[in-house]
Image: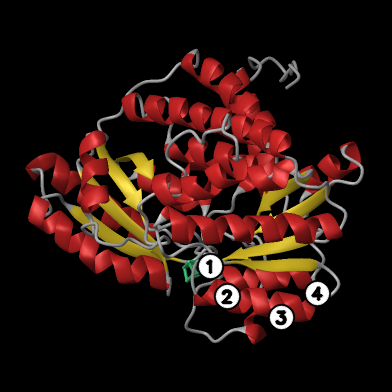
């Protein structure tokens, strides 16, 4: 990334970390996908493929010359005019705003869309998308539910081959194992850069608040993995030099926001209410595979498919077989030395809200305090959440539990 110098009428120039954050925020807020358009201009013939949350195998797309683009609806920036007429009122908000973005032309730089098998809402949205935009490629991505490598892994590898084949028919490069190896290496490097920042956030959450981390990761859904890795690496160096002072906050794990995203101001509200968010499942897709994927193997496509089976995150959005519900959350609380958990799920989000009672029961058994609320991506009032989170943090600080 190029170094820039800014003069601000007598004020000191912004530090490099702040500059990177400003750039990432501009990318995140650009609902017309300007960064994607610029990528296409710089990569003639490359296809931009949007995908809905949470996870898609991004290295496969990069290996065949495509840019995978994460689509998180319209947030709090889009008025829903037509999107509401496609869905019943008692489901989450993200499909309405995504339809709205599609119909009003915001997503026209995308050459295709992928809808992973996350929930019924995404499945229905994928069907509607096919009807609304029949000329553009779109695909439902069936993720494995059977975690035996010779069954689920093999099935998933077939799915990946189908996607590569279909996109090649639409102008993408042919699948090449060496290109996939390089794309996996780039993704591994990005994952490492995220790990470094996550470690810093846990050690010094006042230096790297989750609201900043979130903006950095949202930008990553709009750029190639190598560019994003370099951005994060540069930010990590810069933010360590930035002056920061600790606050007397409680440490919380935030869970439930893996798909529809809360407004950025809601995350800031939690921080201002006395909560240092030391772990979260916002932007889970970039952290979904929890270990480095083997790039130097004979069959990198098989390695990519198997990584979903063997190293996929424990989340409500992924089938969990016999493992104890809530165990992964408790382990995370302990590993991050968190004082409690904040459940923040999108209203009507079936995967998150069906999981939550089991996770709450597990936390109760383990004596870990928690609080919960629901949001919509366009929630504009935070006062109630501020008071609830403030009362939670005070209670945990004073008594180590919720009174
Ligand atoms: S917010 Fe929940 S219910 Fe809605 S699309 Fe996402 S996972 Fe599905």
What residue is pinned by disc 1?
A: 117
Where the N terminus falls, by quadrant? Answer: top right
Question: Is the CB of the residue bearing disc 3 within 8 angstroms of ligand 1?
Answer: no
Query: Which comes sooner in the sequence, label 3 or label 1?
Result: 3
Q: What residue do we see at 45% from left, 25% from top? A: 196
Inter-mark Cα distance, 2 to 4: 16 Å
Query: Which comes sooner in the sequence, label 2 or label 4?
Result: 2
Where the C terminus falls, by quadrant? Answer: bottom left
Q: Give the vertical position of 324 relative to 104 (above or below).
A: above
Left or right of residue 253: residue 259:
right
Q: Give the vertical position of 311 relative to 136 (above or below).
A: above
Nearest to viewer (mark 3 / mark 1):
1
Question: Is the CB of the residue bearing disc 4 within 8 angstroms of ligand 1?
Answer: no
Q: What residue do we see at 48% from left, 62% from top? A: 144
Give the structural element (helix, strand or loop) at label 2.
helix
Q: What residue do we see at 67% from left, 79% from top? A: 127
Left or right of residue 218: residue 306:
left
Query: Which comes sooner in the sequence, label 3 or label 2?
Result: 3
Pointer 1 with pointer 2, Cβ within 8 A: yes
Residue 135 in picture, x, y percent from top left: 86, 72
Query: Which comes sooner in the sequence, label 3 or label 4?
Result: 3
Residue 50 in picture, x, y percent from top left: 70, 57
What residue is pinned by disc 3?
A: 82
Query: Which comes sooner in the sequence, label 1 or label 4?
Result: 1
What residue is pinned by disc 4?
A: 133
Inter-mark Cα distance, 3 to 2: 19 Å
Nearest to viewer (mark 1 / mark 4):
1
> Can residue 110 be seen here?
no
């Amino acid at each position: 990334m190029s170094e820039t110098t800014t003069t601000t009428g007598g004020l000191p120039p912004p530090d490099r970390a702040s500059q990177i954050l400003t750039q990432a925020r501009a990318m995140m807020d650009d609902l017309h996908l300007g960064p994607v358009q610029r990528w296409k201009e710089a990569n003639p013939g490359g296809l931009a493929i949007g995908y809905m949350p949470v996870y898609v195998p991004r290295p496969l797309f990069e290996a065949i010359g495509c840019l995978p683009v994460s689509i998180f609806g319209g947030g709090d920036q889009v008025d829903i005019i037509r999107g509401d007429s496609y869905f019943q009122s008692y489901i989450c908000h993200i499909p309405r705003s995504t339809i709205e973005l599609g119909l009003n032309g915001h997503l026209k730089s995308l050459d295709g869309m992928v809808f992973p098998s996350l929930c019924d809402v995404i499945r229905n949205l994928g069907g509607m998308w096919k009807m609304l935009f029949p000329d553009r490629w779109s695909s439902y991505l069936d993720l494995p539910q059977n975690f035996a490598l010779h069954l689920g892994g093999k099935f998933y590898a077939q799915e990946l081959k189908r996607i590569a084949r279909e996109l090649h028919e639409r102008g993408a490069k042919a699948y090449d194992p060496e290109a996939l190896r390089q794309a996996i290496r780039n993704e591994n490097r990005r994952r490492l850069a995220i790990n470094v920042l996550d470690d810093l956030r846990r050690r010094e959450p006042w230096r790297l608040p989750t609201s900043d981390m979130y903006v950095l990761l949202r930008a990553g859904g709009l750029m190639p993995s190598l560019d994003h890795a370099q951005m994060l690496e540069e930010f990590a160096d810069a933010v360590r030099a930035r002056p920061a002072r600790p606050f007397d906050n409680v440490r919380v794990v935030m869970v439930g926001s893996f798909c529809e995203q809360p407004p950025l101001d809601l995350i800031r509200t939690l921080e201002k209410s006395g909560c240092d968010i030391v772990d979260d499942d916002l932007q889970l897709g970039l952290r979904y595979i929890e270990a480095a994927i083997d790039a130097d193997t004979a069959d990198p496509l098989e390695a990519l498919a198997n990584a979903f089976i063997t190293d996929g995150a424990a989340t409500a959005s992924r089938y969990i077989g016999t493992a104890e519900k809530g165990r992964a959350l408790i382990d995370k609380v302990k590993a991050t030395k968190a004082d409690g958990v904040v459940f923040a799920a999108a209203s009507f989000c079936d995967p998150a809200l069906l999981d939550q009672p089991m996770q709450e029961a597990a936390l109760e058994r383990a004596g870990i305090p928690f609080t919960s609320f629901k949001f919509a991506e366009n929630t504009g009032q935070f006062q109630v959440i501020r008071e609830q989170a403030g009362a939670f943090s005070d209670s945990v600080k004073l008594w180590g539990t919720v009174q």
